[in-house]
Amino acid sequence: MNYATDFPSLKGKVSPEEWQTRLELAACYRLVDQYDMTDLIYNHITARIPGTKDELLINLYGLLYKEITASSLVKISVEGDILAKPDTDYDINKSGYVIHGAIHKARPDVACVLHTHTRAGMAVAAMQCGLLPMSQTSVRFVGHIGYHEYEGPAVDLDERERLVRDLGPHDAMILRNHGLLTCGATIQQAFNTMYQLELSCRSQVDAMAARTELSMPGENVLAHTAHMYQPGTRRPYGVLEWPAMLRLLDAEQKNSGFPPYWH
């Protein structure tokens, strides 16, 4: 069986637009690992390739997020059919793609979909109260987050319609009893939104564990603050932060022992 993880570089063998998307998506996988949002080899981050008719990139099912490189990503159709992949016995997790495929098909404005099973995310997903507006970070999501009730493992194609309905126009969703999901017009935005959603969940779990009365901002503040933190109000999410995130990865790469994400 061929389960090697060092794949020949595709630089110069795919379009410049695809290669740039591969670089950014591989970096996103590494950042999710960097900030402790991974779940073994599970979950996905998908990205739409610019200039194509609904062609996407997704990870091989079997690699750690810290092993993923630009050249290891698999090109698939929006329906989940493999169009091109490395020479390996690793495949993709088609059943796990149901959530991503539903959103990419229904939301042409979405370039990237990110889904996690973090400890804090799953904890808040199990809370009847959902995400509380208890910090500036979480207030960002007031009126801008969806909730999807748990229907079991997301392998039923019929669930796609309800996933899309519950996400609505938002870029974030809590999957009840399951985990977190974000999406965005760019890979950078989807990552930034997930980072903020995860941080909101961690803060909520910590505060509730302190078993003390929580202070919430007044209703007159919530809508205004949430509006101020939307991508189109002042500046796009994630773009200003992205070069710093890449410098972080570059510094970590030197001692990681894993192939660089740009390979």
Image (cartoon, rainbow, N blue to C red):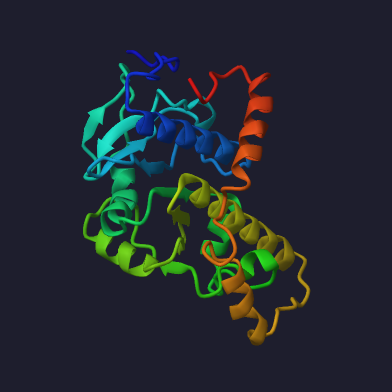
Name the residue located 37 percent from the left edge and 34 percent from the top edge: 17
Placement of 255 over or under 76, stated as above or below: above
State left or right for residue 196 relative to residue 6.
right
Name the residue located 44 percent from the left edge and 68 percent from the top edge: 146
Q: Looking at the image, how many numbered discs can be counted on the residues? A: 0
Q: 207 or 222, which is in the foreground? A: 222
Placement of 64 over or under 177, stated as above or below: above
State left or right for residue 52 relative to residue 147.
left
Tell me if residue 60 can be seen.
Answer: no
Residue 130 placement: quadrant: bottom right
Give the quadrant of the N terminus: top left
Q: How far across and how far down the image is residue 218, in percent? A: 69, 84
Q: How far across and how far down the image is residue 163, in percent? A: 33, 62
Tell me if residue 182 can be seen.
Answer: yes
Q: How far across and how far down the image is residue 104, in percent? A: 31, 52
Residue 7 placement: quadrant: top left
Name the residue located 57 percent from the left edge and 44 percent from the top edge: 37
Q: How far across and how far down the image is residue 70, in percent? A: 44, 26
Name the residue located 32 percent from the left edge and 18 percent from the top edge: 88
Placement of 87 over or under 113, stated as above or below: above
State left or right for residue 244 relative to residue 64.
right
